[in-house]
């Protein structure tokens, strides 16, 4: 915070009016008002008396913080955003530069200032917007050197966008070094580079791989949420998670088998014999759809090999074999349809 803001903040905390403060310091009330509004600054000889009056240290008065709090950064960014909506861009940009000079070690603040300044110059009618490139880029690069990996990653993402706009794709590619190749953000950005460079096949493949990979992630996460609900006996919530799994599998064309797979465990958990039979039959009838995604247009640039019939046959045998689990399916004893399916299983396994 600027010294005027510090004075105003702590004066109000102490419950002192501007007039009372002026009287105690031997200055005029307008002088205090000018300090607080940033029009002028107090004489150096008054700094110690002001700090004593406000009950703070000189470091606090002069804002010699090594780090700003999250709240302080948020307040500054909010003020910057407000100014950009009401004042000329060039003037606010100069004000922001002074902030960076005041807090040269707060890379989180510097990165956020650069993000706001960069975004606003692209969305507002700013004259000669390219003249701000060097400063904004320098701010991003400052944040890129931070010890915090998250701040480095944020800065790299911002620089990536700037380089893409400038069609400096080799420099955009360098920004990806700050991301793990398993990170969806890396995949998206790599695909964007391919697209911008006119490498259509590579772009399709990268985007399709992102869809396929994230299906696996979503599916696993929903499975774990389902399991948590089942362990609590919350069948209603568990069923909702299963329904979402099924919907996602359907939307992303993963095959009918994958749409149904989780429901067998759900039926067993509730010891619902009729539902167990229905789901088991439908799974057995749809084992051939396990490789459905290999035929989907969503993944046609990934060139997956068709699922071998032998693989489907192996899955079918494993499914039939699990029916003999007397502990897991003890509740099915006496169900005629199940007994018939068991007999069929005996001839196949």
Image (cartoon, rainbow, N blue to C red):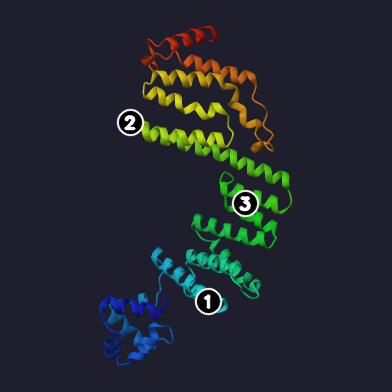
The front one of 333 and 158 is: 333
- In this rendering, the label closer to the viewer, 2 or 3: 2
Look at mark 1 in the image and give the residue it sits on: 92
The residue labelled by disc 3 is 189
* Rendered image quadrant of residue 205: top right
| Disc number placed over residue 58 in the picture, else none | none
**Residue under the image location 57 percent in, 66 percent down:** 119
Lower sequence index among marks 2 and 3: 3
Q: Position of residue 115 (x, y in %)?
A: 54, 65
Residue 67 in view in this figure: no
How far apart marks 3 and 1 lie (CA) works out to: 31 Å
- Between label 2 and label 1, give the one nearer the viewer: 2
Question: With respect to residue 127, does 225 lie above or below?
Answer: above
Q: Quadrant of residue 20?
A: bottom left
Q: In front here: 182 or 209? A: 209
What's the CA distance linking mark 2 and mark 3? 42 Å
Q: Residue at x 60, y 61 (%)?
A: 159
């Amino acid at each position: 915070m600027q010294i005027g803001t510090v004075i105003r903040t702590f004066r109000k905390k102490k419950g002192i009016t501007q007039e009372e403060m002026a009287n105690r310091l031997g200055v005029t009330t307008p002088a205090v008002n000018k300090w607080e509004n940033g029009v002028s600054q107090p004489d150096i000889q008054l700094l110690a008396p002001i700090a004593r009056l406000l009950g703070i240290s000189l470091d606090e008065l002069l804002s010699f913080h090594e780090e700003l709090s999250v709240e302080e950064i948020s307040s500054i960014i909010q003020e910057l955003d407000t100014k950009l909506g009401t004042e000329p861009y060039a003037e606010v940009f100069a004000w922001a530069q002074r902030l960076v000079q005041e807090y040269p070690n707060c890379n989180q603040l510097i990165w956020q200032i650069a993000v706001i300044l960069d975004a606003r110059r692209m969305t507002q009618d700013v004259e000669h917007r390219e003249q701000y490139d060097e400063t904004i880029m320098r701010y991003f690069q400052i944040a890129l050197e931070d010890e915090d990996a998250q701040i480095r990653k944020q800065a790299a993402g911002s620089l990536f966008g700037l380089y893409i706009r400038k069609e400096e794709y080799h420099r955009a590619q360098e920004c990806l070094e700050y991301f793990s190749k398993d990170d969806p953000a890396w995949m998206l950005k790599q695909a964007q580079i391919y697209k911008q460079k006119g490498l259509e096949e590579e772009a399709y493949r990268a985007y399709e791989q992102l869809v396929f990979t994230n299906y696996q992630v979503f599916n696993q996460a929903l499975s774990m949420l389902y399991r948590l609900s089942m362990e609590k006996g919350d069948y209603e919530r568990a069923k909702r998670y299963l329904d979402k799994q099924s919907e996602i599998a359907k939307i992303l064309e993963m095959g009918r088998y994958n749409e149904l797979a989780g429901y067998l465990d759900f039926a067993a958990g509730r010891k619902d014999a009729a539902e167990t039979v229905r789901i088991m039959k439908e799974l057995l009838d749809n084992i051939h759809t396990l490789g459905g995604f290999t035929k989907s247009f969503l993944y046609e640039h990934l060139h997956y090999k068709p699922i071998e019939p032998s693989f489907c046959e192996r899955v079918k045998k494993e499914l039939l074999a699990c029916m003999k689990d007397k502990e897991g399916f003890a509740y099915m004893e006496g169900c005629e349809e199940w007994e018939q399916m068991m007999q069929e299983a005996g001839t196949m396994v």
